[in-house]
Image (cartoon, rainbow, N blue to C red):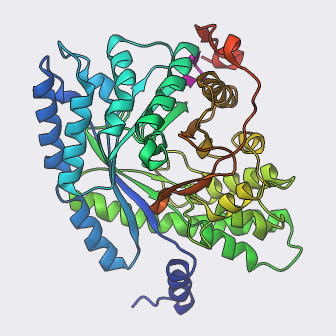
Amino acid sequence: MRFINSDSILETINMIKVHHLDIRTVTLALSLRDCMDTDVKAVGEKIYDKIIKYASRLVEYSNEIEDEYSIPIINKRIAVTPISLVGEACKEYDYVYLAKMLDKAAEAVGVNFIGGFGALVEKGCTRGDTALIESIPEALSQTNLICSSINLASSKAGINMDAVYKMGHIIKKTAELTADADGIGAAKLVCFCNAPGDNPFMAGAFHGIGEPECALNVGVSGPGVVSAAIRSLPEGTSFDELANKIKQTAYKITTTGELIGREMAQKLNIPFGVIDLSLAPTPAEGDSVAGIFQAMGLEHAGAHGTTAALAMLNDAVKKGGIMASSHVGGLSGAFIPVSEDAGMIEAASKGYLTFDKLEAMTSVCSVGLDMIAIPGDTPIDTISGIIADEMAIGMINKKTTAVRVIPVPGKKVGDKAVYGGLLGEAPVMSINHLSSSEFIRRGGRIPAPIHSLNN
């Protein structure tokens, strides 16, 4: 007979009920490469039928597992092959139509979001890539569940500055077409460097070309659990002991995600993919990465020492989590989205956390400039300059970085953009007003760094 430690049971209950432990997402990753056709209408129908075939019971099974284990599963999502590839064989491009078919299928199976309306253009654009990118504003403004991501750079290829410049226009237009909702279209659009093909988190999820036919990827959460664990330590605990406590906590969180992921994959009769270890915050009180910084001893996020605290947190989460699963992937670390983290919202609103400090923090976090509201009149060239800077950080450091900024139409510094739900709300932040125009409009590619030649 196996005895279960009552302390472990109580600890798990506290993690879920008090400290917001949850499975942030179960994401069905699905290849649509066999949906290609010369007729765009046929492609759309094939896409719809395949999503229905594989994902029709995703939400049902998620709810069953949630009830069985009493662990909240917050989001059910789908990630598909970059749609620029799927639609490229068509005689006539109509990527907006394909977006609508994806949206229709996502609504039919009841998921929260579907990702993959995107392209991989770090070294250049094909005709299909260009057509998809140009369709993004219309596609995101005419759908409800579509998320879009474009990979603009990599440590191997450098930075596609033509595409960076183009995305400045696309982000601005997408926000303008959804002005009635504070530019929410731009909140579903992300620019990447070194995008992973197995990321279960939105808006950047897609099914990479090296992935299997389908897989079930899981994103765990738990910043509140980590914060509580740190606060349980005696005052003056050393960084060595602090890091060990975070590793132990990450191990427990990841074990929970591994259990749920494998159960879910078995029910769906598909392979289990990866666990993404990322600490994904929410606007709920006590579920904040910024709160972890305060538990470590900083007055607030943005204080000098914040980047060091984030670096240690990110590393400890990865070290602890990787011991709990043989298949760790995605982004894996700590997210710092401004609008989705109550502590980050407060820090930005009070001026403790500046745009430049956020950029510095992206050198050690697991993503980048995420869910940041900027003035609606921000010039396109400035938006492109922001993207270029973040792509450079990822390229040089051989890590994933991303930009999800929202130029909120009609709003200025000090105003607030409100999205609700997990997207939360964000104060419109001040950015540098110096011109980037001449630099951004040079075109071409910024070459890959010397350390890319490591064959």
Q: Give the extent of the magenta segment.
A: 152-160
Residue drawn at 75 percent across, 77 percent down: 231
Residue drawn at 67 percent across, 76 percent down: 228
The residue lying toward the viewer, choosing from 211 and 361, is 361
Q: In which quarter of the image is the C terminus?
A: top right
Quarter of the image for residue 75 reads bottom left
Task: Determine if residue 404 is in view.
Answer: yes
Is residue 10 positioned above or below 202 on the image?
below
Is residue 454 positioned above or below 290 on the image?
above
Q: Is residue 264 left or right of residue 418?
A: left
Q: In this view, does 93 lie to the left or right of 228?
A: left
Quarter of the image for residue 82 reads top left
Does the magenta-highlighted stretch encompass residue 157? yes
* Dominant secondary-structure state across the stretch colored magenta: strand
Residue 232 pos. (x, y %): 74, 80
Residue drawn at 56 percent across, 18 percent down: 165
The residue lying toward the viewer, choosing from 266 and 190, is 190
